Image (cartoon, rainbow, N blue to C red):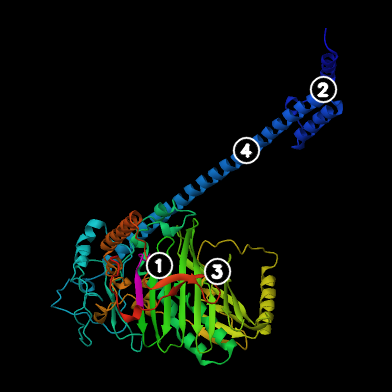
Amino acid sequence: MHSPSHSENTRSQAHFHMPEHPSTGGRGDSDGTLIQYLHSGLAQVALRGHSILGYRALRGWGVWFRLEETRSVGRVWSLKLEQEVEKNKALTEALQTLATEHYELKQSLCKNRRSSTLSTLTEDDFYDAVSESESELSVSGFLSVASHSCEEDEGRDAPLLSSLRHPNALRGPTGMSGEGDHGNEPAQYNGVKKHSPQRIACFVLPDGSNSPKHVYRLLCSRGTDVSIWSILKKCIGMELSKIAMPVIFNEPLSFLQRLTEYMEHTYLIHQANATTDSVERMKCVAAFAVSAVASQWERTGKPFNPLLGETYELIRDDLGFRWVSEQVSHHPPVSAFQAEGLKEDFIFHGSIYPKLKFWGKSIEAEPKGLITLELPKYNEAYTWTNPTCCVHNIIVGQLWIEQYGSVEVINHKTGERCSMTFKPCGLFGKELHKVEGYILDKSKKKLCAIYGKWTECLYTVDAAAFDNHKKTDRKNSDEKKGNKQSNVDEEPEEIPPPEAETVQIIPGSELIWKITPRPENSATFYAFSTFAMHLNELETSMEGVVPTTDSRLRPDIRAMENGDIDLASAEKKRLEEKQRIARKNRTKSTDEWKTRWFQQGPNPHNKAQDWLYLKGYWDRNYTNMPDIY
């Protein structure tokens, strides 16, 4: 005989009915069908009022619902992941195909150029190697020398490379015993094998330039037998500072030396010191901040990564400054520097952490770090950060550079600031290299406008006149576009046309900075400016004076400047391995790396983390320097 409770439960179970499960035919087209089904079933359980059965059913359906929800979300993400994998695979294959085609086209073009050039050259166009006793290098002015970008096969180039590796084959800044003066005699070329297409170009700075010393350079080809894509395809989205790149992609300068190019337009600092108006000083300082990145125009070569403890100094009496820099960290790579006016009229210091990333078609360099300019005469300090630099067409097409981002120069004494925008190129290149902004007082009132291009010049004009010009220019642009729409954020595949390289001058404007013209042969030598060509010069008077950690003494950079790419590559690998071993040995001991000339601390003007100069470098006491080369 059944108890009443049991029979009652049996009857209630018989009367309990759940609606049709959506998987058995009751499924609707929308995702809400499952939820409606659960709600109706749980409602029936609640209405019965049977606490035990209702609780069990509620708990069971809750668990089932959570499992179904988890499975549904998992299926969605799995599908998205499969789609992204397929997209990535298709993109990789497309880029590899383009890179292969581009490489084959370049090889074909090089062969055609080589055959056509060699057929027209005569015996007079080539020079036998001559001994050191027979000739001295001497040239006046800039000498244009043809340089072939494509080399013969490796076997044919072996005699040439052998002659270039010989210590007496090329007498550059490190190997000069004297400089001959032969008047108007034709230039002679040491170390070049007869019938070799490779040439040596000797640059002598023009009269009235920065230094009377000669700068001997070898115009060596980067070569076309290296596939950029084969190296970079594994680096998409990665930080390039942690990747060892072939030396063929470098320029013969260390990053410490390249930082020194900030000082090319030091006259702007002197102009700021010469005026008593704080707004006029801000104009000069803002122009100096823009001019500091002007040297990057067309500089597609990568500077050598400095070794930990590497230093670089430069004294320029004609420009009125002396500079010292040190590599204070390796991972992350941080370079600290300080420049002083020889008359103690300014201090320029900062630290830069160049964060590089590869994005498929371009490489982006974000120069993290703070830059400070102090003018003791007015007890003023200015701080700012540099814009982002991007190199386009890494895989296919002509390499070109743009700078973009916001730069704000702040006067920490008066509260005035100059807010500038480095504009991205856009689809049609209209905004290429453009810089514009305003100088504001501490209440953010516009005092004047600044505009121009970081590759050319910078102007200042009344803020109202600039705003009216922008409105008129925008109206004219809209009329030209008509109904056409363009995506300004889309990255152009090719370099914008040359006609974009102009600045429309607004009436009433005042020129505050103009870029120094580059040498005629700049394009054939890494797009260096005259200032940059001095940076690796090692004079006889420097030997035993500069510390053993100076960038001028790096054997890989010197070998590359001398045209010996094989030796440069071998030395680069040797130095990197030596640095790795030294770091590993430090981890095994209690010794920690200590910087020599800079220490980390808060910037005195905005309290941000910075590297500050410790003083003592110019005392010339270089004992116990690390052996890094």
* SS for callout 2: loop
Mark nearer the N terminus (1 vs 3): 1
Tag 4 or tag 2, which sits nearer the N-term?
A: 2
Badge nearest the viewer, 2 or 4? 2
- Residue beneath disc 3: 404
Identify the amino acid type marked 1: Val
Residue 394 in percent (x, y) is at 45, 60
Point out the residue furthest to the top here. 1
Please tell me whether mark 1 sits on a helix, a strand or a loop. Answer: strand
Q: Is residue 517 above or below residue 84?
A: below
Q: Which residue is mark 1?
A: 328
Residue positioned 26% across, 57% down in the render: 153
Disc 2 designates what residue? 17
Q: CA distance from mark 2 to mark 4?
A: 31 Å
- In the rendered image, residue 309 lying in the magenta stretch gets the answer yes
- Is residue 369 covered in magenta? no
Please name the amino acid that badge 2 sits on: His
The mark lying in front, picked from 1 and 2, is 1
Q: In the drawing, does residue 394 fall left or right of residue 607? A: left
What's the distance in space between the residues labelled 1 and 3, CA to CA?
Answer: 27 Å
Q: Earlier in the sequence, mark 1 or mark 2?
A: 2
Across and down, in percent, residue 50 comes to: 83, 25
